[in-house]
Image (tube, rainbow, N blue to C red):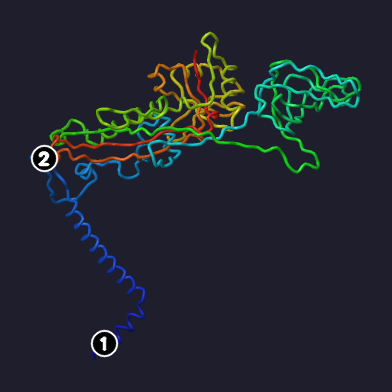
């Protein structure tokens, strides 16, 4: 009978496969849930719900472990996703620190950061001496001149040079053209740069002579021109220059006495609120150091160790723009500012202008036209900017009260976010100090630490704005 009964059960299960699978699934879920409850309760038994005792000790009591109680037992708010939480704390007040955190950082294996940066080869210089018009005595002579410039090294054989403001000539060589004079470089030596004219005048039956060129004329290096049989070209060498900055150890400590934590409060002011306020103050101090700090290493005789101070990006910028106090700052001067910010470097066409209240006020009072528009707001890196558009590029404008505090309310800095790099020796971290156990004082203490510095790559992509 048992065999017959078992056979009937198997037949029934085959006929009701879906029901059987559903019942088995429910049973498995119940078993897993039961195991999870056991594991959870075990965890709670280990971690516990921590409450302070009358003598400052800690006790475990029954009940669920909530986030708030967990922070009371171990107030280490920033263990996970540190940067993601930090960047949400008043980002508008610390734009440099904010942007550097969003851009990502590189690990520095030492407090001393050595880095290399490559600048672009100069493309323009000025003539140091007048060049007289070439006047060959014989028709078969090649009209060649040796010129002396402020930077002969930027020219090589086969380079072409545009002579700004000096007219070239038509093909007949007798009438001037609307195009500037073009020179061709034959050689460069200690005497200067030996050149020929590409579109020069015809003098005494000799074509492509070199006309008179006055001292101070700007010479612009253009592309190279090779002959059909040329296989090689003068070498192009770009050597990076070495720079150095120091990581500064930034620290902030938060303490709360045990009785303060236990006391009833009119508002919910907890250790977490103190941490947030401390992080803001710490970031504000870092912002000032990242902008205006001086890279130095000092010996503290009392501590018997070196203290490192980071260098700010203000002194790393490779260009300057001056606003004259005696002249009105109008739309044309603003165009000049944007011209200098976006030209003469290998930077991007979207940059950030951070300035004091005086500078921002001057810019805000301008009457904008089709050339410059300022009616759009852009949110990037967690910051709200006002966008200034021009034919040269876009500037994201932001007020920084750090400049006001430094007595530089009329000044500012234009930075290229593509070429700002943060180096971190010690990532932002928190550590709970057990001052009770060590017998120092009866408080909950938390110390926040970061060792880092900022570096501007391609210095000429960044510009200081100075008021004088």
Location of residue 317 in the rendering, given as x and y in whole percent from the top left corner = 50, 26
Expressed as whole percent of the image width and height from the top left, the position of residue 244 reads 45, 33
Q: Relative to residue 326, is residue 186 depicted above or below?
A: below
Q: Is residue 93 visible?
A: no
Query: Does residue 419 appear left or right of residue 448 in this picture?
Result: right
**SS label for mark 2:** loop
Residue 388 vs 232, above or below: the answer is: above
Q: Residue at x 73, y 19 (%)?
A: 165
Give how far apart the Cα atoms at labels 2 and 1 are: 68 Å
Image quarter of the N terminus: bottom left
Question: Where residue 270 is drawn, which disc sits there?
Answer: none
Q: Nearer the viewer, residue 381 or 452?
A: 452
Residue extending furthest toward the left? 54
Front residue of 427/55: it is 427
Q: Which mark is residue 5?
A: 1
Q: Which residue is mark 2?
A: 56
Point out residue 46 in the picture as x, y percentages from the top left corner.
Answer: 18, 54
Q: Check the image and report above or below for 352 versus 369.
A: below
| Location of residue 103 (image quadrant) | top left
- Give residue 251's quadrant in the image: top left
- Residue that protrudes farthest toward the front in the picture: 190
* Horizontal relation, residue 166 to residue 153: left or right: right
Determine which quarter of the picture holds residue 157: top right
């Amino acid at each position: 009978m048992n065999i017959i009964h078992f056979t009937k059960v198997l037949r029934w299960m085959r006929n009701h496969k879906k029901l059987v699978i559903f019942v088995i699934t429910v049973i498995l879920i119940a078993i897993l849930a039961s195991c999870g409850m056991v594991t959870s309760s075990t965890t709670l038994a280990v971690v516990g719900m921590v409450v302070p005792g009358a003598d400052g000790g800690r006790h475990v009591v029954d009940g669920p472990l909530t986030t708030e109680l967990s922070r009371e037992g171990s107030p280490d708010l920033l263990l996970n996703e540190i940067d993601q939480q930090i960047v949400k704390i008043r980002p508008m007040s610390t734009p440099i620190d904010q942007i550097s955190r969003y851009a990502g950082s590189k690990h520095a294996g030492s407090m001393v950061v050595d880095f290399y940066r490559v600048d672009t080869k100069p493309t323009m210089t000025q003539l140091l001496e007048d060049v007289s018009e070439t006047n060959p005595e014989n028709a078969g002579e090649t009209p060649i001149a040796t010129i002396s410039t402020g930077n002969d090294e930027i020219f090589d054989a086969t380079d072409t040079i545009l002579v700004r403001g000096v007219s070239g000539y038509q093909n007949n060589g007798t009438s001037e053209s609307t195009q500037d004079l073009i020179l061709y470089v034959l050689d460069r030596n200690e005497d200067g740069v030996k050149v020929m004219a590409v579109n020069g005048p015809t003098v005494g039956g000799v074509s492509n002579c070199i006309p008179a060129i006055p001292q101070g004329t700007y010479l612009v290096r253009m592309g190279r021109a090779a002959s059909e049989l040329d296989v090689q070209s003068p070498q192009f060498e770009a050597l990076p220059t070495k720079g150095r900055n120091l990581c500064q150890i930034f620290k902030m400590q938060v303490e709360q006495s045990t009785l303060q934590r236990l006391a009833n409060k009119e508002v919910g002011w907890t250790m977490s609120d103190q941490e947030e306020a401390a992080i803001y103050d710490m970031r504000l101090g870092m912002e000032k150091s990242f902008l205006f700090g001086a890279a130095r290493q000092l010996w503290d005789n009392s501590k018997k160790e070196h203290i490192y101070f980071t260098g700010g990006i203000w002194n790393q910028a490779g260009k300057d723009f001056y606003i004259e106090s005696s002249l009105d700052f109008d739309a044309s001067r603003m165009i000049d500012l944007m011209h200098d910010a976006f030209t003469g470097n290998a930077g991007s066409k979207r940059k950030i202008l951070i300035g004091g209240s005086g500078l921002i006020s001057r810019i805000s009072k301008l009457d904008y036209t089709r050339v410059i528009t300022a009616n759009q707001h852009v949110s990037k890196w967690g910051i709200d900017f006002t966008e200034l558009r021009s034919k040269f590029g876009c500037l994201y404008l932001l007020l920084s009260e750090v400049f006001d505090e430094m007595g530089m309310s009329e000044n500012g800095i234009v930075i290229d976010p593509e070429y700002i790099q943060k180096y971190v020796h010690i990532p932002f971290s928190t550590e709970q100090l057990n001052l009770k156990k060590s017998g120092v004082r009866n408080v909950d203490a938390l110390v926040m630490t970061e060792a880092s510095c900022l570096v501007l790559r391609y210095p000429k992509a960044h510009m200081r704005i100075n008021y004088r």
